[in-house]
Image: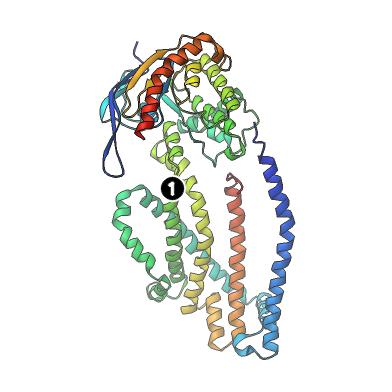
Amino acid sequence: MPDPDAPATIATASTRREAGRPLIAVLQVAFFIFAMAAWQALTAIGVLDPFFFSRPGDVALRIWDWIWSGFIWPHLLVTLTEAMLAFVIGTVLGVIFGLAFARVRLLAAVFNPYIRIFNALPRVILAPIFLLWFGLGIASKVALGVTLVFMVVFFNTYQGIREVNPVLLNNVRMLQASQRQLLRYVYLPSAMTWIFSSLHTSIGFALVAAVVGEYLGSARGIGFVVAQAEGVFDTTGVFAGLILTSVVVLGIDLLIERLESYLLRWRPPV
Amino acid sequence: MTPALSFDNVTIRMSTPDGGVLTVATDLSLDVGEGTFTAIVGPSGCGKSTLLNLAAGLLFAPEGKVRVFGDVLTGINRHAAYLFQQDALLPWRTVIDNVILGPVIRHVPAAEARRDARHWLARVGLAGFEDRFPHQLSGGMRKRVALAQSWIVNPRILLMDEPFSALDVQTRQIMETELLGLWQETRKTVLFVTHDLEEAIALADQVVVLSARPARIKGVYPVDLDRPRDVAEIRMIPHFIDLYNQIWADLRSEVGAAHAGS
């Protein structure tokens, strides 16, 4: 007995989306062209000083040059490695601790104030200390990234586990699941939506941490390139580094979105 | 013969948000014979579901005892399956993955579990829907999946908490008919909570009437209607109507009391 309303709703939703998509894409491209043209024009007529603001054409040329000369690849690779390590370690730790805190009430009760204090801390300030502790190499950037990623994933996992539907739990308990089986079949899958929504934020954080860490002290990476450019008042280089970073984040975010919509395909369409 | 389920002087108290104590049920004693179909009716909020949760082992009574085939219940009732009022299927698992959950938890080999699950899905009329997700099914279909999920582990006792109350009248009668068909073949012990007296009489061997809170057993009425029954037509039989009037006379005062109290 399929719901008589269901096919109709799906049909209207999909036709609406088909009509909307190209229009949105056109508007997005139009906005990009407008913003770049405005930037270029303002520098051309002298409202913006190219020394401080560079020009979009110059920035594009610089990125093009970096890519084709091969200059940027080792730096990008280092930054991405740092970000990925921080992302993976932070996520794993966040899920484990979130799980433990959500399941063991005593743990949550005792450590609650400390977690809050740590969360309230502007953790980017830790970057110089991590440089002292872990040196100028990759480790200090990964450590900074982990502190950022961990918090986001931790809170979302905690929340996700706490908000598991008790009816689902009772149902699976009645099917005689052990504690471990409850974790595997109910708690973790149920927390997945929360964990996934945190991945978008945390991947950005991981990359920010890597770039900031490199900026403050390193010999390689995008942050290093930006710092070098800044040192010689090369604003074009600074903008090129920043834009490259955001494009990379966007790319990774799209991949996560793909993965997410596959893994969460069981959810009813909104 | 030891009853499949017995409640022995059970009293349930719960703490209220404002610090008080609410007595949900006092001195409940009830025996449910093996292979019988017992329906529990009572005014809303009288603790019918609490009684089921006690039988399931999801809740414990500080006073009194619950026995399952003679043994005092101290954990989850391993002989029982539970059909909940709300949707209890795991939304991230497909229909077949939901049905095999019980066998998988019991470490039945996957191939065997899937074969069983296909069999049960066919029994409840859902062959071909194995790979759908719960949200892609109607409410009635989800209840069928839940039936298959609880029946596949071959429980000796089936606890049902207003399982069909969210369905429309036609779907509900279809589900009641299917439930009776399945029960007729397997003769499991069923404890069925409902607020619908007609449903109770149409399905059960005995109807237990609970009083308004704190719940006591107001009366136990044997239903001596012939089986197999047709849930739609049985409602027209004079004896059904007699039984209905007789039990309703008892229930009505309690529903009134529950209203006055709330």
* Chain under disc 1: A
**Total numbered circles:** 1
Which color mode does the image show? rainbow
Residue A128 is situated, as x and y percent measured from the top left of the image, at: 40, 76
Residue B165 is situated, as x and y percent measured from the top left of the image, at: 51, 29
Q: Determine the residue positioned at 45% across, 55% down.
A: A156
Q: Determine the residue positioned at 45% across, 50% down.
A: A160
Near mark 1 (Cα within 10 A), the count class, few <14, some 14-19 or many ≥20, is: some
Q: Classify residue B58 as left or right of residue B148.
A: left
- The answer to whether residue B61 shows anywhere in this view is yes
Residue B140 vertical position relative to residue A149 in the rendered view, above or below = above
Q: Quadrant of residue B61?
A: top left
- The answer to whether residue B51 shows anywhere in this view is no
Q: Nearer the viewer, residue B164 or A194?
A: B164
Q: Quadrant of residue B182?
A: top right
Assign a secondary structure to mark 1: loop
Three-letter residue code for mark 1: Glu
Residue A38 is situated, as x and y percent measured from the top left of the image, at: 69, 81
Q: Nearer the viewer, residue B7 or A97?
A: B7
Q: Determine the residue positioned at 49% across, 75% down.
A: A214
Residue A116 is situated, as x and y percent measured from the top left of the image, at: 35, 63
Q: Nearer the viewer, residue B113 or A198?
A: A198
Q: Determine the residue positioned at 67% across, 91% down.
A: A46
- Quarter that holds the N terminus of chain B: top left
Q: Nearer the viewer, residue A87 or A205?
A: A205
- Quarter that holds the C terminus of chain B: top left
Residue located beneath label 1 in the image: A163
Q: Classify residue B65 as left or right of residue B144.
A: left
